[in-house]
Image: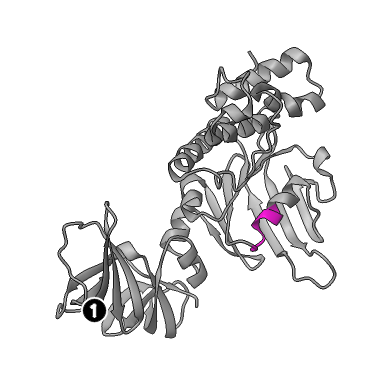
Amino acid sequence: MAEIRGNAASVEFRGITKIYGRNSSPAVNDISLFVEAGTLVTLLGPSGCGKTTNLRMIAGLEFATHGQILIDDVDVTRLPATDRDVSMVFQSYALFPHMTVRENVEYGLRFSGFNRKDMTDRARAGLELVGLAGYGDRLPSQLSGGQQQRVAVARALVLEPQVLLFDEPLSNLDAKLRRRVREEIREIQQKLGLTVVYVTHDQEEALAVSDRIIVMNNAVIAQEGTPRDLYEAPANAFVADFIGEANIFDCRIESVSAAMATVTVGPVTLRLPARGFSPGAAKLAARPARLEIHPAGTPDIIPGRLEKVTYVGSHLEFVVACAFGEVFVVSNDVDSFLAMSQDIGLKFASPGPVLIAG
């Protein structure tokens, strides 16, 4: 029985720029990044930010206007897709409807010098790896969306690529199925030690599967780091609001000492990591779950009025009007009896807010 193995390689961008047409703005603007071999790195951002263009340049489906792309320290910038050891799983799955599942998985092997027996063995091993042993004789139309996606993954895996690319792979699946398939992709990646570059606009998906996340905005990198780094310490308002929801408060840094800042937010004074900021006007990001609602008149609160209360099963969602505008708060206390139009106060939990760039 054939065995599918990892063949992981690093990926590096050195000053990559991509421009479509003479007078167009760059789709990707002077990007440098490094994907360590055997890791899953997600390119995350809104539509049009350049993340899919980056993926297509790794695959050789697009060529960079400027800069270098290296795979396993080899310059592949001008190599066509056929000369790169890279496989791609598309959003649409791209399965051939007239071929069986096994034939779909074998398709790429036909052009890679494998004999009939090797192709069959590798296809069987690939299907077993994605949990579809025994499905080889079915047609794609006889499978669910999640099963079709796993066939597409198997087809890519049997080639044992140096780099495996995913372009919005879960966007056609419902919420529960998305969660299950993303867990399967992550499990396979870790089991085989694959290098995976994964594109999505879904921040929850990115947080769930990634070793590192590269957040893109307007053709450049806004921030990169581990999922926890980006969630706990966003660099700016865009990242704070894109990686989960965040409330942005105007504040003032009164002083900085030993890398800690004394910060005033309305009537409240906080001590926070300075993160390189100097005294003066600044901004603060606070996650909805790290704000607490207290009775009006409680010391050290931001006064507000409860505008909306929504029960969503596992938690309550509140909209609070205060001097900083509308603030969104999440509480696990589903038995709270707070009522709309009630005067309340907001407190920052600990750990709570972080200073960010505007």
Q: Residues within 10 Å of mark 1 (few under 14, many from 20)?
A: some
- Quarter of the image holding residue 68? bottom right
Q: Nearer the viewer, residue 283 or 157?
A: 157
* Quadrant holding the N terminus: top right
* 219 to 267, vertically: above or below: above
How many discs mark residues in the rendered view?
Answer: 1
Left or right: residue 287 compared with residue 121: left
**Residue at x-position 30% and y-position 64%:** 290
Residue 141's spot in the image, x, y percent? 61, 30
Left or right: residue 138 compared with residue 58: left
> How is the protein colored in the picture?
one colour
Left or right: residue 178 compared with residue 79: left
SS of the residue at dot 1? strand
Residue 108's spot in the image, x, y percent? 75, 29
Residue range highlighted in magenta: 48-54
* Residue 279 visible in the picture: no
- Quarter of the image holding residue 317? bottom left
Residue 249's spot in the image, x, y percent? 38, 78
Left or right: residue 23 compared with residue 106: right
**Residue at x-position 58% and y-position 48%:** 41
Residue 26's spot in the image, x, y percent? 74, 67
- Three-letter amino acid code at the position of disc 1: Arg
- Quarter of the image holding residue 325? bottom left
Circle 1 is placed at which residue position? 305
* Residue 175 visible in the picture: yes
* 59 to 262, vertically: above or below: above
Whether residue 158 is in magenta: the answer is no
